[in-house]
Image (tube, grey):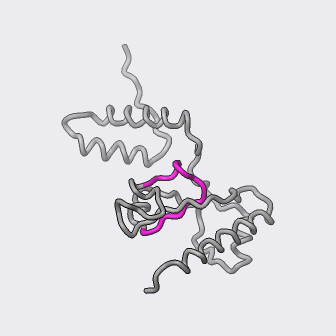
Amino acid sequence: MTASSHPVLPDERLAAGVARLAVRHQGRYSVETAQRLIADSYEQLAENAHVRTHPSGAVDPHVLQALTEVGAALDEVCPKPLTDEVVQAADIVITMGCGDACPVVPGHRYDACPVMPGHRYLDRPVPDPGGAPIAVVRSVRDAIDARITTLLDTLPST
């Protein structure tokens, strides 16, 4: 019998998870066991996933154009994943239609978070502007701007 090869992990964050589990359970489970469990879990989740990709490596050209038209600073614009750490650190998390595909902290599923008072999780779906004509992208940009303005009007002054 030949030794089985280690499963390939499709994302460096999964490898980081393996490392954390290996350290946490050192002496009880091997690194290989943690790697097999994470790879297996990932494969099972991916079979039924609605969102199958991470943010792209570049911002859509029409999105860049629409943002430039309103004077947005584009110096360091790049797609950014919504990680568990970001969600936990935020007072307000606003997603745009990813629903259960986005990371959530228990209690953040509601406009007013019962677990962590003062924290809010808002899902405000908009059409995906990726690959859309410029007119659609402008419409999405304007809808997001209106929602942000409305939210800012509801926040207490500091």
Q: Is residue 36 left or right of residue 81?
A: left
Residue 98 falls inside the magenta stretch: yes
- The residue drawn where x is 77% and y is 63% is 136
The one nearer the camera, 29 or 134, is: 134
Q: Quadrant of the N terminus?
A: top left
Image quadrant in which you'd find residue 139: bottom right
Q: Residue at x 50, y 58 (%)?
A: 82
In the image: residue 10, left or right of residue 26: right
Residue furthest to the left in view is 27
**Residue 135 in the figure: left or right of residue 144:** right
Q: Based on the displayed image, in which of its 4 quarters is residue 71 positioned?
A: bottom right
Q: From which residue to which does the magenta span run?
A: 91-104
Quarter occupied by residue 112:
bottom left
Closer-to-camera residue (77/48): 48
| Residue 93 image position (x, y, % from top left) | 49, 64
Q: Is residue 80 magenta?
A: no
Identify whether 34 is placed above or below 65. Answer: above
Question: Which residue is nearer to you in this view: 92 or 71?
Answer: 92
Give the percent coordinates (x, y) of residue 15: 40, 44
- Left or right: 29, with 88 as reference point: left
Residue appearing at x 59%, y 61% in the figure: 124
Q: How many marks?
A: 0
Q: Residue visible at 40% across and 37% down?
A: 38
Which residue, as the protein is rendered here, is positioned at the far bottom? 158
Residue 36 percent coordinates (x, y): 38, 32
Q: Position of residue 158 (x, y in %)?
A: 43, 86
